[in-house]
Each structure stands twice: as C-alpha cells, then as structure tokens.
Image (cartoon, rainbow, N blue to C red):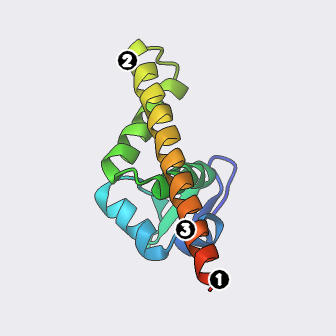
Amino acid sequence: MTDGSQATTMHIGAVAERTGLSLRTLRHYDEVGLLRPSGRTDGGFRLYTDADVERLLLIRRMKPLGFSLEEMADLLAVTDRLAAGDVDDSLRAQLDGYVVAARERRADLARRLAMADEFIALLEAR
C-alpha cells in the first residue's frame, strides 16, 4: 500500500513477525490505546508503518522490565514530546526517572538470573 504520498505500511502479521509480539498483543495494544496502527484498509485490517514498529519495539523492550501499560503509554508520550522539540525540564525529569527505573529493574533481573543459575548448578551437582 504505497504511493508517493504515503508511508509504506504492513499488515499485523508482518508486524508480529518483525517485533516478536503476538497478534493478540498487538490487537490488545490497539484496543487499550497504547499503540494504534497508523491506518486501516477499506476492509478494516490494521496497517502499521515503520514508525509504529519502532514504537512497538520500544514497548517490547519495556515488557521484561515489568513496566505497566500506563507507564509505557506515559513514556511514549514523553519521548514524542521530546522528539517534537519540547524542552520542558519536567519532561526531561520524567525521562530520567524512566532511565533510573529501567536500570534498577535490570539490576533486579540480573540478581534473579544469578540466583537461577546457582539453583541450576546445585541441581546439576546432585
């Protein structure tokens, strides 16, 4: 679905394949308003752009860190405003807060992974 005035679009199946997200997850994100596709076909099929895919990849990276849908939506809004040139100090502070939270959650995951490795090693030693 490309012409000179429109961005290249893809159907939900192609997006699922590119992002590793399930069709159900993509539909859910649309239904709750986290990420709506950029368009729809005349038959109502969702159409996503490369920009939509990039946003979905950001969301996918937040999932293992346990961010809620609300936090994901908030971060997308913050990054959108910053990308649009909004230099509000409160936006930068919000983004910095997400960086701190992501680092803390990553450290927790690393600790849990190390504990899992120890557990596996104990089992294998028996």
Q: Earlier in the sequence, mark 1 or mark 3?
A: 3
Name above or below for residue 1 compared with residue 70.
below
Please name the residue that numbered disc 2 is placed on.
90
The spot of residue 22 in percent (x, y) is: 50, 74
Residue at 44% in and 38% down: 101
CA–CA distance between discs 1 and 2? 51 Å
- Taking depth in this image into account, of 126 and 82 the one nearest to the observer is 126
The quarter of the image holding the C terminus is: bottom right
Q: Residue furthest right?
A: 4
Badge 1 element: helix
Q: Are marks 1 and 3 in contact (CB under 8 Å)?
A: no
Q: Secondary structure at mark 3?
A: helix
- Report the amino acid beneath label 1: Glu
Residue at image location 42% in from the left, 14% down from the top: 88
Spatial CA distance of label 1 from label 3 is: 12 Å
Inspect the image, locate mark 3, and give the three-letter code of the amino acid beneath it.
Ala
Residue at the location (50% across, 25% down)? Answer: 82
Q: Nearer the viewer, mark 2 or mark 3?
A: 3
Q: Is residue 5 left or right of residue 34?
A: right
Per the image, the residue denoted by label 1 is 124
Camera-nearest label, 1 or 2: 1
Q: Is residue 56 in sight in this rendering?
A: no
Element type where label 2 sits in the image: helix
Q: Position of residue 27 (x, y in %)?
A: 40, 69
Q: Which residue is mark 3?
A: 116
Task: Work out whether residue 67 or residue 118 is closer to the camera in this orientation and state it.
Answer: 118
Q: As shown in the figure, which amino acid type bears the numbered disc 2?
A: Ser
